[in-house]
Image (tube, rainbow, N blue to C red):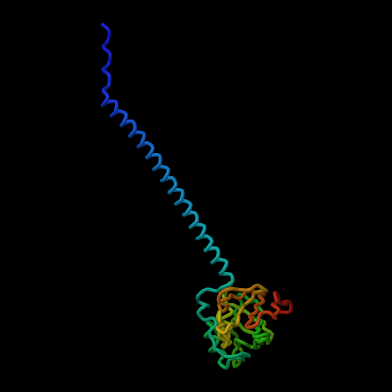
Amino acid sequence: MPDPEPARATKTERRRAAREHAESIRREAEAKQRNRRLAIIAGTGAALATLLIVAAIGISNAQDDDSSTQAGSGSGAVSGLGAAAAPPWPLPPDATDRVAAAGMDTGPMGMAEHYHAHLDIIVNGEAVPVPANLGIDPATGGMAALHTHTADGLVHVEADTQDEAFTLGQLFTAWNVKLTAEQIGSMTTTDGNELKVYVNGEEQSGNPAILRLADQQQITIVFGDQQQVNIPDTYDFSGV
């Protein structure tokens, strides 16, 4: 006898099967869409992580670069501390006290490192001299690591250790002349005057008091009118 034909699905069964097939397709589509969203989120997170890493590296490099021109917080804390007096600024009568205030002493001279920088100060178009024998005890002849011998702005740096950081502000503290980003001596930028600092002809930003001294720097401080000032980009250290 021939096999009986399979029973035909009822209309209700066909509708249920169609709904189940449609639901299966919908779930598959939702799963694909969800996976795409997860991939986008993961990609965005990876990109953000990369940006954060790059930013961190940039900040680190900027800090490393900055360390070449700015000293650490130790010497910065004793930088630019002085009197708010008008120029010209003479030698302080209490040389050893001022040297101590700058975080130095007038003991035996350091032999680990010896280099020179040159400082020009121009206030309202007029040169202000840096006095000779700054940082030197007149009673004993003892010298601080930062000192001058002549009144031509030549600064001697004689350090006890290699790569010891000294700042421009430490020299000003030993000189008893206040120095900040907005003030030199008694003169401030609050009345519209400008105070700018240049190293080898390049304008510097930030607080000049924490400018780190380096070999053969030509440092120029200009207060007041900037238009008529010729900013030197070098100094002849050959005779030092």
Residue 119 position, x and y percent, is: 65, 81
Q: Quadrant of residue 201?
A: bottom right
Residue 232 position, x and y percent, is: 70, 77
Residue 240 position, x and y percent, is: 71, 79
Seen at 32% across and 29% down, the residue is 18
As drawn, is 87 to the left or to the right of 46?
right
Residue 106 visible, this angle: no
Q: Quadrant of residue 208?
A: bottom right
* Depth order, front residue of 208/116: 208
Question: Split into 4 quadrants, where in the image is the N terminus?
Answer: top left
Seen at 27% across and 16% down, the residue is 6
Q: Residue furthest front?
A: 11
Residue 115 visible, this angle: yes
Is 102 rendered above or below residue 93?
above
* Depth order, front residue of 4/147: 4
Q: Quadrant of residue 146?
A: bottom right
Residue 49 position, x and y percent, is: 46, 54
